[in-house]
Image (cartoon, helix red, strand yellow):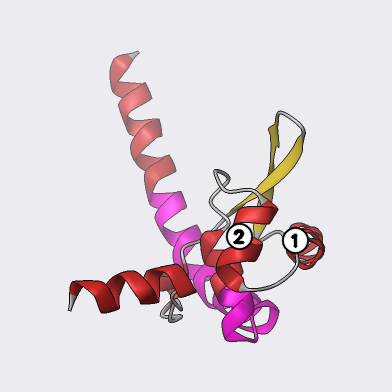
């Protein structure tokens, strides 16, 4: 039974590899279209499920309603997933921009920190 299970796992890994490969171009196209500004790319990048809309809004210099509006739109497109938290819902990005060759901008805080280091 173990040999059959190992064989099944190996086949599933092979299917997963090819599925990722064939879907990568489509995901990149969707991300590029949905994240058509540096600001949107930054907001998407910061949407890790740990930060709330207010925290991301400060980092991106926008209102938190803008963050929530983007999250809702991106959820319909399937590029973020909802995370239930105390007091509401946050969203977590489904993909890392760097994995698709999309540059990830820095927040104002990250820019200030990098200037301090230099």
In this rendered view, identify the residue nearer to me: 105 or 60. Answer: 60
Residue 37, position as x, y percentages in the image:
63, 86
In the picture, which quadrant includes the N terminus?
Answer: top left
Residue 7 colored in magenta in the image: no
Quickly name the residue at label 1: 64
Q: Is residue 68 above or below residue 6?
A: below
Q: Is residue 51 visible?
A: yes
In the picture, which quadrant includes the C terminus?
Answer: bottom left
Residue at x 45% of width, y 51% of height: 16
Residue 31 colored in magenta in the image: yes
Q: Earlier in the sequence, mark 1 or mark 2?
A: 2
Residue at the farthest front position: 116
Does residue 116 appear to the left or right of 94 in the view shown?
left
Residue 10, position as x, y percentages in the image:
33, 39
Does residue 30 appear to the left or right of 1 in the view shown?
right
Circle 1 crowding by C-alpha within 10 Å: few under 14, some 14–19, many from 20: some
SS for tag 2?
A: helix
């Amino acid at each position: 039974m173990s040999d059959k299970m190992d064989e099944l796992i190996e086949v599933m890994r092979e299917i997963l590899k090819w599925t990722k490969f064939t879907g990568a171009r489509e995901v990149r196209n969707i991300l590029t279209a949905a994240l058509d500004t540096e600001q949107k790319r930054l907001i998407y990048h910061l949407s890790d499920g740990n930060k709330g809309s207010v925290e991301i809004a400060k980092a991106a210099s926008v209102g938190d309603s803008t963050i929530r509006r983007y999250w809702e739109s991106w959820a319909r497109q399937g590029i973020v997933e909802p995370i239930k938290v105390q007091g509401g819902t946050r969203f977590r990005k489904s993909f890392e921009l760097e994995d698709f060759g999309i540059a990830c901008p820095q927040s104002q805080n990250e820019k200030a920190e990098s200037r301090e280091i230099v």
